[in-house]
Amino acid sequence: MKQSVTIEIRDNAVLKLLQNLATLNLISFKTEPDSKDDSVTARLNEIYKEEESSLEPCYYIAQNNVIGREDW
């Protein structure tokens, strides 16, 4: 099964390693995001203009009770 992952690489050594792996055809590596990713984001933005994205209050309270609060 082919999977796609988008990551931002800031470390030049990691970038070089990924480019080398792509050269050996061990991974598929591209430097620009796929236009398909943009269309998915655009569609989600359309949906969430009209739909509420937050949890219902009862689920929010239950989640907070289970997880608890953590100071950052």
Image (spheres, rainbow, N blue to C red):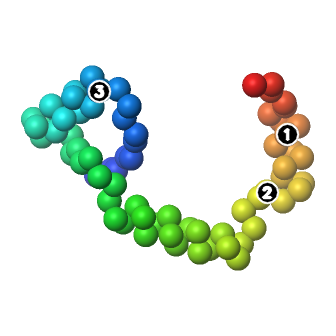
What is the x, y in percent for residue 58?
90, 54
For this view, does 33 lie left or right of residue 45? Answer: left
Residue drawn at the location 26% of the way across and 47% of the way down: 31
Residue 1 — which label?
A: none
Label 1 residue SS? helix
What is the x, y in percent for residue 30?
24, 48
Front residue (pair 17, 68): 17
Residue drawn at the location 40% of the way across and 40% of the way down: 8
Label 3 residue SS? helix
| Amino acid type, mark 2 | Leu
Q: Which residue is mark 1?
A: 64
Q: Which residue is mark 2?
A: 55
User: Is 69 placed above or below 58 here?
Assistant: above
Q: CA distance from mark 1 to mark 2?
A: 11 Å
Residue drawn at the location 77% of the way across and 58% of the way down: 54
For this view, does 24 lie left or right of residue 49? Answer: left
Residue 1 showing in the rendered view: no
Quadrant that contains the C terminus: top right
Label 2 residue SS? loop
Q: Which residue is mark 3?
A: 12
What is the x, y in percent for residue 25?
12, 40
> Nearer the observer, disc 1 or disc 3?
3
> Number of labelled discs?
3
| Amino acid type, mark 3 | Asn
Mark 1 touches mark 3? (CB < 8 Å) = no
